[in-house]
Image: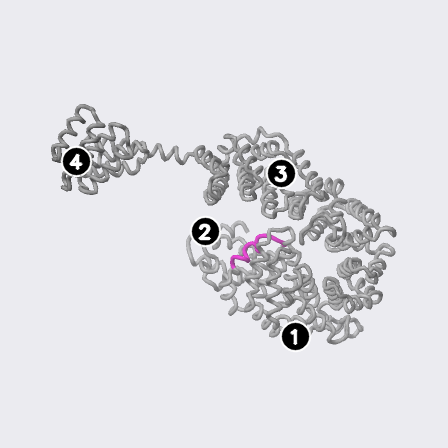
Amino acid sequence: MEDPVQLKEKGNECFQNKDYDKAIEYYTKAIQLTKEKKVLATLYRNRAACHLKKENYVPAASDASRAIDIDASDIKALFRRSQALEKLGKLDQAFKDVQRCVTMEPNNKTFQEILRRLNSDIQDKLKIQFSTDSRVERMFEVLLDESDDKERKEKAANNLIVLAREDAGAERIFRNNGLNLLMQLIDTKNPEMMLAAIRTISGMCSRHKSRALAVLHFVGLDKICSIMALDNEEIALATSSLFQTILDNFGGEDSKEHRGKDEALVLDTSKDVKMIITRLLEMLIQKSVSGHGRDQALNLLIRNVPRKDLAIKDNTRSLDTIDMGLKKILKVAGQFPELSDCLPLTENTCLTASILLNNLYCDLRGDDERETYRKICEGYVTSKFDPQSMEKNLHAIQCMSALLQGPVDVGNAILALQGVMEMMVALCASEREIDQMVAVEAIIHAASKASRANFIISNGITLMKDIYKKSTNEKIKIRALVGLCKLGSAGGTDYALRQFSEGSTEKLAKQCRKWLCNPKIDTRTRKWAIEGMAYLTLDADVKDDFVQDEPAMQAMFELSQSADKTILYAVALVMVNCTNSYDVKEKIPELVELAKLSKQHVPEDHPKDKKDFVQQRVKRLIKAGVVSALAVMLKADSAILTDQTKELMARVFLALVEDVRDRGKIVAQGGGKILLPLALQGTDIGKIKASHALAKIAAIADPEIAFPGERIYEVVRPLVSLLNTELDGLQNYEALMSLTNLSAKSEKLRQKNNQGEGTA
């Protein structure tokens, strides 16, 4: 038979007799012979029905689609395609086909019933598809499948981290063997997989004490410490964050926000906290711990050992830490990279150790506790002095440097011991470069008081000059230069008290700027040039020259963005000096005259410290990009970004916004965003300075531009804090002006202001 119509009829007979294979054979032959579209549509539709009966759903959907392509209104083809698509699991596409059928035959109850059923099935499928268990299972499958592509793995890792931050998600991960699977990810040694696993575990522990305790015991304290000890900065930081999350739970932080329902069943965790602190102290002196791991151990101790509020009487953690680990901290603080057998360090390790030493000392409650602390330090340092071992002597001197940068009272007490200062000066005369380097650094830190500076000027200034002139090692030369800078600035801002002859200070500053702008010198060495400028910019001639040297300013800003965060304080200090934003005692004319009559010294102001010169320097700093530099500095996630450094930054900002004409530029560069954290965290003086700077901006700027989004509501609290009778009238006035400007924007802001004022 060559007639397509007859072939179709034969196919229909076979279909009626349930001989579907034969029917398909007839329909296929007819399709090959005919070109008439109407007949072709019928043949494809009929063959699709045969495939449906045989449960061959892919060819069924394909044939139905061909029929629909010829005749879009073929309701039978649409229905058959929907049946095939449903069986293939493509419910959303099947639903659309049935919808079209209902549109064409709205009274057809069969279509209506199928449409309702498909809708219900789709909803059920979505629930299953997006259920937490299913999501967790799919993510782990992707992450643990070595053959899966990198992009899918990264997506799964990010999704897992997000899921762990939800209580339901964290609970499902925890209860469905999630910890075991996460440990498998960590054991892959793949840094990206390890990071994803650590961050997921951290999310699971957030604000859930029982889960945090379970994680600590399941994973094990030694295992967590070994991960943090790896020589990978991101992994060390993520593990530190996990430790902090666990300690926040154990310490009762944010107790109102704990999500676990079984918190009451959790045992006392004070032993676990002590165990963690003990293990962190042990990490400090282990050779197997990387520099990044050591930094994070120090940061965790800084955050969790000293009291956050000195009104709390219990300082047991600090006392226990001093008893168990003060000597360990001193050992880290006394490391010097050029010494043999030095522990692995980063640029920030020794200064971070100094900060921990200082914070522990400040957390002590009485003279007896401070005396015990001093004796331990004194015993440790003096025990290292050994005529037979120069390396021990250098370690002792380096410990002195650390103490002078931290608990300075303790450092000065040890410095006053017979022979200590003399030994430091004598080391400058050594022929070994490492001896000179350690000694010069110690002298720089020792000359913090005029009496010390005078001692060194009279006993060792010639040696330091010789080192600077004769040494061929740039690292030593620049340190000697900084020593000379510090000695030259011992008179502070007093124009009459210059340690060196006229012009010497400017020469030192010029050399510092030259070192600073030399990119061939390593960052660790160049930072000393900024240290020198931090001392020398107390001189108005020096700071005026510095702000006119744009390459030097840019070099300083670039260095502030480097991995070496020890530079932050010096950079902030240079900015404070250049803007004259340090505290200056008011001169009372009557007292000045009285001092002159009694032949007492009266501090003199430098001509270039007058208001006009200061304003010019401020404008040059703004033009050079000081706001962006401050923004980068503030992002530093390090204990080295101390409250004192933040206070310096707040002082600089207050000076920058003094001129109304400059405030628009500050806002355009993100000044409002940067000021908020400074106004909320730091020293009391720093918070007031930053809040005052915010008030100056908010008083005249469009609040929605200066503080976009939700930030506009966050600015109210620091502004309200200025409404205090103990503050001066200008601060009160500008706070009121700024709150008035904010209140004019919306009812919600007015309510926020009213609430703030009520609290105040």
Give whichever of discs 3 and 1 has the lower sequence position: 3
Residue 750 in which image quadrant: bottom left
Q: Are marks 3 and 1 in contact (CB under 8 Å)?
A: no
Binning the other alpha carbons within 10 Å of mark 2 as few (below 14), some (14 to 19) or many (20 upward) gives few
Disc number lying in front (1 or 2): 1
Which residue in the structure is indicated by mark 4?
A: 30
Disc number lying in front (3 or 1): 3
Nearest the viewer among 228 and 3 is: 3
Q: Are marks 4 and 2 in contact (CB under 8 Å)?
A: no
From the viewer's perspective, tell me whether residue 419 is left or right of residue 685: right
Which residue in the structure is indicated by mark 3?
A: 224
- Segment colored magenta: 672-683
Q: Secondary structure at mark 2?
A: helix
Where is 326 relative to 13, above or below? below
Give whichever of discs 4 and 2 has the lower sequence position: 4
The disc at residue 608 is 1
Disc number lying in front (4 or 2): 4
Provide residue 736's location: percent of width, then percent of height.
Answer: 51, 60
